Amino acid sequence: MWHSDTLGVIRTPKEITVNGVTHPRQIFRKWSKAQLAELGITPARVETPDQRYYNTGAETLTLVDGETVISYAGTEKNAEDLKTQIISQIKSYVSSTLSSSDWRVIRAQEGYKVAGQDWTDYRSSVRDHGNALEVEVNAITDMDGVKAFQNHAVTEVRYTSTYDAEGKETIGPETEEVSRSVDKANWNWPSAPDAEADPYHVNYK
């Protein structure tokens, strides 16, 4: 991405005309920064506030070490509004998750043995997990709390695998740790009794 005071933001190489002279798009790949600068063109990058938490405002262009930084003012969103959205997301997840096994409950009520105790326990655990998340969200008092909930750091312990000469895989016993950030509203929900287990997952630290 590049920027020119006369041409604006140039997102992809294209033919341009500067001071009456037409230049092919290849100049953006073949010319040096100094050569492009002679035409008033600088490399550019965009810095935007996280739109999950900020409303995007006025645009500002700043030249930093020969690079145009395009930034936007950001006004913080209302934390209570975001909490409401998160809780709505949690409720929706609980509803859609339970609906997929509602037929088991209905058939069981009709006398068919399709919803054993494992499914009853699972459905209960889904509700309990959703309720616990709602309590946690309701306890959030500011935007930092919202960000922490939606960017929760976790470390997963996973088995590594090895392969023999014939290409047969052996999972474990060696493990590795994988760290990442998760949105707690979408993470670590109970698994259905018929869900396929992840053979590599050991636990979360």
Image (tube, helix red, strand yellow):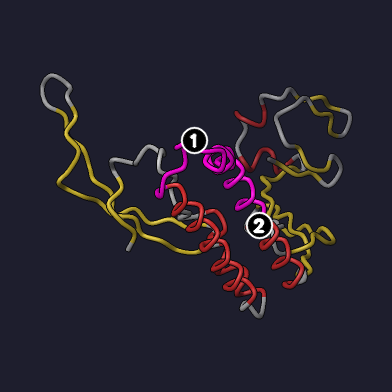
Tell me where residue 159 appears, x and y as whole percent.
23, 46
Q: Residue at x 47, y 58 (%)?
A: 125
Please report the bounds of the magenta region as a residue range.
92-118
Q: Quadrant of the N terminus?
A: top right
Q: What is the spatial separation of the Cα atoms under label 2 and label 1, in whole angstroms?
A: 29 Å
Residue type at tag 1? Tyr
Residue 155 x, y percent position in the rendering? 36, 59
Q: Is residue 87 left or right of residue 156?
A: right
What residue lies at 31% left-to-right and 47% top-to-bottom? 201
Q: Residue at x 38, y 56 (%)?
A: 179
User: Which is more foreground, mark 2 or mark 1?
Assistant: 1
Q: Which residue is mark 1?
A: 112
Give x and y (percent) for residue 5: 83, 47
Q: Residue at the location (17% across, 24% down)?
A: 168
Pick whichever of labels 2 and 1 is earlier in the sequence.
2
Q: Which residue in the structure is indicated by mark 2?
A: 91
Instruction: Give yes or no for residue 201 being in the magenta stretch.
Output: no
Where residue 198 is drawn, which disc sits there? Answer: none
